[in-house]
Amino acid sequence: MFYPVNLRRENGRVVYEREGVRKILPECEIIVNPVEPVNLPKNVTRFLEVDFDPILIKPNSVETIYLKFPIEIGVFAKHGDKLAVVDVFSFEKPKYTLYGTPKNGVVCRWFKSEVYYEVPEVDPLRHGVMKLVIRNGGDWVEVGKVVLDCYGMKIYYSEFASCWAEMKVISKISAETSFVDRPIERGMKKAVEMWTTRRLIGRSFTMEWGLK
Amino acid sequence: MDHKKANRKIVYDGVGVEMNYEGALIFALVVALGVLVAKLVGIYVKRMLADRIPKNELNLILKILNVSILSVFALLGLPYVGVNPSGLIAAGGFAGLVVGFASRSVVANLVSGVFLMLERPIKIGDQVLVGDVAGFVEDIQILSTIIRTYDGLFVRIPNEKLFTSNIVNVVANPVRRFEYVVGISYKDDAGKAIEIIRRVIDEHPFALKNPEPQVFVNELGESSVNIVVRVWSPSSVWYNVKTELLWKIKVELEKAGIEIPFPQRVVWLRGERDGLGKDVPA
């Protein structure tokens, strides 16, 4: 497997190199793990939109589906409990979109996924698995997209990255989404996220401009 | 002794206020303490909120805190110089009238500044166009607003002028659209050109998926078939996207052998005629 990162010792320091990036680090712990996909090529938003083939949800029911989502890979330097971002890169080409209107909408990292009913196989360097629990307390509703605030994203990983999200349907065109701080499978390790190093606070997001 | 005492007194006949050096010293100390407290609170708040809220909002909070703390300390110090703050209110009516006439434009700028801060049509860091000045908003002060033009010049606009001008805020909305007209020669396939342009747009991360880009033949021009390209992009990066995409479109069209022609005109000169008596080109 091809890894583009090179770490080597030079004059008692660690040299980090990746095509065009070269940084000199002190002796410290280096952490490499999947991070929320809103940093590349430049951080312009905190939101992720995953589109999928619309599914009909029965009244007063709970539906659990699995989706793929893009990941970026973060490299961190750790000393004690303090973290610093060394680099972020990705094997997946990013694409952005607008959710909502040009006046009030939000820019989102965009991804199109198929709908799965069990954990799908993924390319672990490009994609993670999102468990999405849709809670519908009202009438029939059609859902074809989920928009999430990535500054509250909780990523767990083992052989692949994963996250657990919930969508509470409010009406046919609105829903509240948030991440759940739990792994989708046992034995997964919690990833260090970019937003924690930036001390940013994530929260739930209300989808007001449609669910499909 | 009396002579010395008299020297220590300063009398302001205008408002009937009496103060002495000790009082002035205490007033100065209270104000200095206010400056110190405002500075310390400012540093603490800045450190606490620096990573959590946008820079422009932080600056506004810091300014409001600074002015509030200084005002409180100044009011606390006034009795030491013989000024009763409640008396100021009464004196303020007349004094305000005088000051108002004397400094009408200053007051107008001040009031405009307050309204600008409340209405907030622009924020620090925004890209704006005010009259013929275009650039980044560097600071919004109580009397004036500072713009750094794209070529790095410092421009101070009085708030009254800014408040009564048409302000174009380039980044007020999260996204914006830009447009090109790409002319291709009549002999080339416009359908293929549209396909190539769509692919180039699709490959750019910040050319938004939604609102969908538009690419269509808009005009059969004098020298070219004109294709209009409309792309939406996040406002914060739109200019980079605009410049990058245009060049990529040109390169990709040329790679596919599609010509972007120069304006051209075929000139026929009268004089020579063919066998049928018609003019022939020179």
Image (spheres, rainbow, N blue to C red):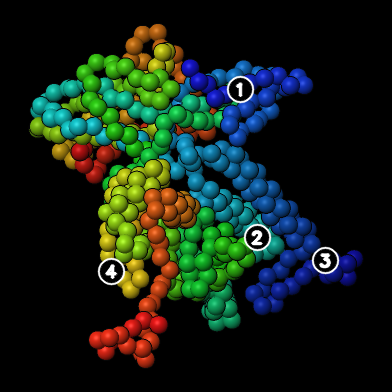
Residue assigned mark 2: B78
In-front residue for pair B269/B116: B269
Q: Nearer the viewer, mark 2 or mark 3?
A: 2
**Dot 3: few (<14), some (14–19), or many (≥20) neighbours within 10 Å?**
few
Q: How many marks?
A: 4
Q: Amino acid at mark 3?
A: Arg
The label number, if any, that marks residue A6 in the structure image: 1
Q: Nearer the viewer, mark 2 or mark 4?
A: 4
What element does badge 2 sit on? Answer: helix
Q: Amino acid at mark 4?
A: Leu
Residue assigned mark 3: B8
Do pointers 2 and 3 mark residues of a single chain? yes
Q: Nearer the viewer, mark 1 or mark 4?
A: 4
Q: Nearer the viewer, mark 3 or mark 4?
A: 4
**Between marks 2 and 4, how big is the CA–CA gap?**
77 Å
Please tell me which of labels 3 and 4 falls first in the chain.
3
**Between marks 3 and 4, how big is the CA–CA gap?**
90 Å
**Between marks 3 and 1, how big is the CA–CA gap?**
76 Å
Residue assigned mark 4: B220
Question: Left or right: A129 with respect to A59?
Answer: right
Please name the residue shown 64% across and 31% down the image: A22
Chain bearing mark 2: B
**Dot 2: few (<14), some (14–19), or many (≥20) neighbours within 10 Å?**
many
What element does badge 4 sit on? Answer: strand
Please name the residue shown 59% across and 19% down the image: A30
In-front residue for pair B251/B124: B251
What element does badge 3 sit on? Answer: loop
Please name the residue shown 35% across and 54% down the image: B231
In-front residue for pair B58/B246: B246
Q: Tell me: residue B88, above or below residue B37.
A: below
